[in-house]
Image (tube, rainbow, N blue to C red):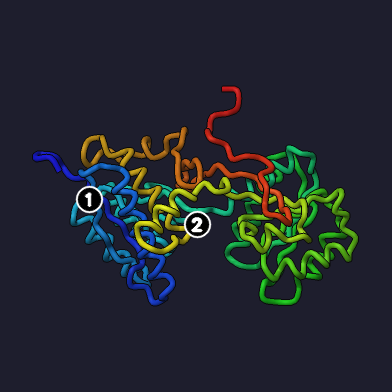
Amino acid sequence: MAPGRTPVRVGILLPFSNASAQTRALAQAMMKAAQLSLFDAHNSDIVLIAGDEGSSAQTAANSARQLLDQGAEIIIGPLFSQSVSAIAPIARDRGVPIIGFSTDRGVGGDGVYLLSFQPENEVKRIIGYAAAHGSANFAALIPQNAYGNHIAGAFEENVTADGGKVVALQRFNPAGDDAAAASASIAAQHPDAILIADGGNALKVILPALDANGVDRARTKLLGTGLWNDSSASRDAALQGAWFPAPAPFADDSFNAKFKETFGTNPPQLASLSYDAIALVALLAGGQPYHRFTREAITDPNGFAGINGIFRFRPDGGSERGLSVLGVNVDGATIVDRAPTTFQPQGS
């Protein structure tokens, strides 16, 4: 760092000592991605200060205080919603923004911005595309869990916003035996499109039940969520022609290759989030110390370019992403509609 310059102190709060070995490994990978991003930014003024989210909100709160006492101008992380809620008032008292990784939009806002893969974005994209291509009467099969709660609210909101009608919404126990009955109930309403917000074993029950109860695949479009973005669903012959939202295919190949070359292992998907967070910090780091990470700068409506495509922060602290629509094909998912490259309206 050049003499006389004020370092940009960035706190990064991740669950390094979490009780789960898998979570600890994820934290380490996200930290490595942050370091890789810092190296790529070529900004020697930025200093990363690591803090431990641990396994509890209290640990996260204590670590946040330590990061702030060390001069952090912005906090990247934590990962879990309860930790974000715990540190939010502490950071807010110091006027320090948070870029957290929770998918729970309820903990965002008032200085907390959530850079995560939020299911609401997926629902908005796939419902909007289906509505624009002729679907008017929508139904949904949604699991009874926290993920499903996010999906259900977004489904009803976006169907209405796009001028459609919700003709049925059935919740089912993903660990139970009621998915077939829920599917039969959906089929009886003869929808134009059915959102199936689950993958894996649930599809093996739902798809035969829909067919057995008279769903005509020629006139009823099956829609998925990001849970379908794996080889088991995206190549499933039983889902041939169905649509689901996902980041642009192969968009993260360069990052994945660089991470593996540097650290010797493949990165988990969430590692790209910490890379993007530090890249964003580097982009905004040129302002006045302790006044550079403003609400106006972070919520720039033009958004930012990330590993998995464009993203921007909403006023409520949630984030929006540019997603592709992919079609299921036995030879692999194919692009039906490319991810947008700008948040500006077409023709503007």
- Residue closest to the far left: 3
Q: Which of pointers 1 and 2 lies earlier in the amino acid sequence?
A: 1
Query: Position of 256 compared to 4: left or right?
Result: right
Q: Amino acid at mark 1?
A: Val
Q: Is residue 23 visible?
A: yes
Callout 2 secondary element: loop
Q: How far across and down, in percent of the image, does residue 267 sit?
A: 44, 60
What residue is shown with label 2?
A: 103
Q: How far across and down, in percent of the image, does residue 291 sit?
A: 25, 38
Image height check: is 207 above or below 317? below
**Snapshot quadrant of residue 49:** bottom left
Q: How far across and down, in percent of the image, does residue 311 sit?
A: 48, 42
Image height check: is 191 above or below 171? above
> Which of 169/193 is in front?
193
Callout 1 secondary element: strand
* Quadrant in which the C terminus is drawn: top right
Q: Which mark is residue 47?
A: 1
